Image (cartoon, rainbow, N blue to C red):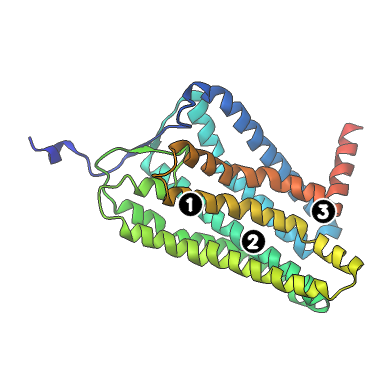
């Protein structure tokens, strides 16, 4: 019988390996990850509740923050429950369709988060550079349209992803190097030309992450130019409203770019680096964003303090 007859060219399942080299500690690592996930859900959920409950916070900056918190909950939820199943119960097998769904959710939600961060930068640009037009430009209907555009953009850009993966034959190893499904990871297991997938991935990164990060950088150049023309007190107040957003931008883009670099130069680094960067990329922003906005944003901090005071009495 020929070798080709012993090989399956269709993938029905993939195998997740968790964290290489730390399999013995998977059970205890799961408690740490679960605690971080629970904190991310509760922290972002609290942000959403406070903004929804407080009429005075129904302003563009806080409404965009509410969108960011909702995306962070969905993004962490798309990976963490499955990781808990893997680490606690050693459930290493994931179905092909389930892998595609998780992959689509991760990448589309990342695109949505990038768009919302860009919208938040635009809000700060208008508020500081064109303060008299801020209320007229960022009305409630326009904010809703921006939120809808973020969803449509993220979903549309990633719509071809399942098609590009389904066309690939898998005739070798189906062991993924991450704790969940990523496009970069899955396509490397194919036993066919993956140039189309590589080109598609580059187009997505350039048109979403590259374009958004460029526009965010340009917005802050204009913000700094406008702030320098203000008095020292007004300058500090204006820039103070941007600190939380700048932190959120770095928390999202730095791990994302780092993960892309690790995949690009994967032969240089060990597989543990891939896993650590992937987990940082998806878990750290949802965990730290509520802390950053809770500490740095006075209005959010005051209402969180008031909320906890009511619950403890």
Choose between 104 and 272: the one closer to the eye.
272
Q: Quadrant of residue 63?
A: bottom right
For the C terminus, which image quadrant? top right
Please state which of the two labelled residues, at mark 1 or mark 3, is closer to the viewer.
1
* Secondary-structure class at tag 3: loop
State the image quarter where residue 122 is shown: bottom right
> For the point 86% across and 53% down, which residue is it?
298
Q: Disc 3 versus disc 2: distance between alpha carbons?
A: 18 Å
Relative to 293, does residue 310 appear above or below in the rendering?
Answer: above
Decide: is 37 above or below 217.
above
Res 246 quadrant in image: bottom right
The quarter of the image holding the N terminus is: top left
Q: Residue at x 42, y 52 (%)?
A: 264
Report the residue marked by disc 3.
297
**Cα separation between marks 1 and 2:** 24 Å
Q: State the mark number for residue 261.
A: 1
312 sits to left or right of 43: right
Decide which of tag 1 and tag 2 comes sooner along the chain. Answer: 2
Residue for badge 2: 116
Disc 1 to disc 3, how far (Cα)?
33 Å
Horizontal side of residue 46 vs 287, given as left or right: right
Q: Is residue 142 visible?
A: no
> How many neighbours does mark 1 have within 10 angstroms: few (below 14), some (14-19), or many (20 or more)?
few
Q: Position of residue 220 (x, y in %)?
A: 70, 68
Tally of numbered discs: 3
Report x, y in % for residue 161: 40, 56
């Amino acid at each position: 019988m020929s070798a080709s007859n012993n090989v399956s060219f269709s993938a029905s399942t993939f195998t997740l390996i968790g964290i290489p080299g730390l399999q013995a500690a998977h059970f205890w690592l799961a408690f740490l990850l679960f605690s971080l996930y629970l904190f991310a859900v509760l922290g972002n959920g609290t942000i959403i509740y406070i903004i929804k409950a407080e009429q005075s916070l129904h302003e563009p900056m806080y409404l965009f923050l509410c969108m960011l918190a909702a995306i962070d909950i969905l993004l962490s939820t798309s990976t963490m429950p499955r990781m808990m199943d893997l680490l606690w119960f050693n459930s290493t097998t994931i179905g092909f369709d389930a892998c595609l769904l998780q992959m689509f959710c991760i990448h589309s939600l990342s695109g949505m988060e990038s768009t919302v961060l860009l919208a938040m930068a635009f809000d700060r640009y208008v508020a500081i550079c064109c303060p008299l037009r801020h209320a007229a430009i960022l009305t409630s209907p326009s904010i809703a349209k921006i939120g809808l555009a973020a969803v449509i953009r993220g979903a549309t850009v990633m719509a071809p992803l399942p098609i590009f993966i389904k066309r690939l034959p898998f005739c070798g190893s189906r062991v993924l190097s991450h704790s969940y499904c990523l496009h970069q990871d899955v396509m490397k297991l194919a036993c066919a030309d993956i140039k189309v997938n590589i080109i598609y991935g580059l187009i997505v990164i350039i048109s979403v992450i590259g374009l958004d990060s460029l526009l965010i950088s340009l917005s802050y150049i204009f913000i700094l130019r406008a702030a320098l023309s203000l008095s020292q007190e007004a300058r500090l107040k204006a820039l103070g409203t941007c600190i939380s957003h700048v932190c959120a931008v770095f928390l999202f883009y730095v791990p994302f770019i780092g993960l892309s670099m690790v995949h690009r130069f994967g032969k240089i680094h060990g597989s543990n680096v891939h896993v650590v960067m992937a987990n940082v990329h998806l878990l750290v922003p949802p965990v730290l964003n509520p802390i950053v906005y809770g500490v740095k944003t006075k209005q959010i901090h005051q209402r969180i303090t008031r909320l906890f005071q009511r619950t403890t009495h």
